[in-house]
Image (tube, grey):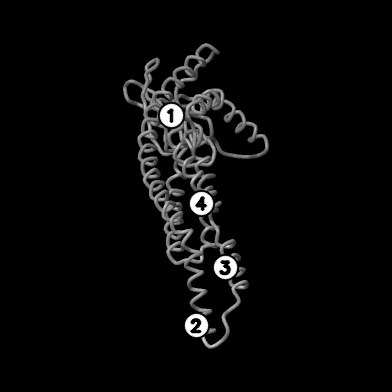
Amino acid sequence: MSLSMTGFGQSAVAFEGYRITIEVKSVNHRYCEVLYRMPREWSCHEDALKRVIQSRIHRGRIDVYMNKVSDAGQATAALNHAMVQSYLKAAEELGTYGAEGKLTVQDLLSLPDVLMTGVEQPGEEKREQWRDLLCEGLNLALDELLAMRSQEGAFLAEDILLRLDRISALHSELEALAPRVTEEYRLRLRQRLESLTQDEPAFPTAAFGMELALFAEKSNVEEELTRLRSHLDQAEQLLQAAGPIGRKLDFLIQEMNREVNTIGSKANHLAMTQHVVELKAELEKIREQAANIE
């Protein structure tokens, strides 16, 4: 099942008089990158939260937003008494160097770490309780996010399969056109030689046969068509497979582009060239869609 890398989920859990809200959103990224915005006292849980995310998401940039408010609806804030005393002591020591002035309340509130969101929770047991609660809320938010990623991934896979069907149809037309290229070249070459030598002795058939064989060898695209068919089958199977498929699909698209480019360089035929142009357009559209698949 294909999963998109774009999604959004949110959850809310309650603990000890607080309502914890969690929002998770993800966008395209080559790897799995996790970014947090949360109260400072929860930063010690980042590793545990990251393990939860990486156990369920393999690719994408994941932004995690966490906040808590009291049941009364007011944001919680506590004074860091130790930090305030430290600042006041430092200001007092500066006075010994001749510095004048006093710290005001406004000055203190503007200094780092004077205010803490929430009440500090001492003790290992309490930290574990908060960690487990945050992981629980994160999993609930990830459930929503993954449901959205799954739904969008299904739409992407459906669109890609339709384009693969079109490429398969063009492939079949190229297979039918390929044998005609040499025959049409033979007729054109014979007609031109006959028009040039109508008042002269017959043109040398040996040279004619050699030229025709050389052209047939240069314009032969059977190997490229065989490999293109193999890549098409693999891509269709991949879209039905479980787990991350984005990078594998991107590799197959590159390989298909390589075969199509080779066919285009060999094809000395207007209809085949037109088919190659359409093939490249379809592959580019698939590449754009595949860039959002995990």
The residue under label 4 is which amino acid type? Leu
Name which of mark 3 and mark 4 comes first in the sequence. 3
Relative vertical location of residue 177 with respect to residue 15 in this rendering, above or below? below
**Residue bearing the label numbered 4:** 225
Mark 1 Cα shell of 10 Å, populated few (<14), some (14-19), many (≥20): many
Q: Which mark is residue 212?
A: 3
Residue at the right extreme of this rendering: 97
Q: Residue at x 50, y 24 (%)?
A: 52
**Residue 96 occupies quadrant:** top right
**Residue bearing the label numbered 2:** 195
**Residue bearing the label numbered 1:** 66
Q: Residue at x 43, y 48 (%)?
A: 286
Name which of mark 3 and mark 1 comes first in the sequence. 1
Q: Closer to us: mark 3 or mark 4? A: 3
Mark 2 secondary-structure assignment: helix
* Callout 3 touching callout 1 (CB < 8 Å): no
Q: CA distance from mark 2 to mark 1?
A: 83 Å
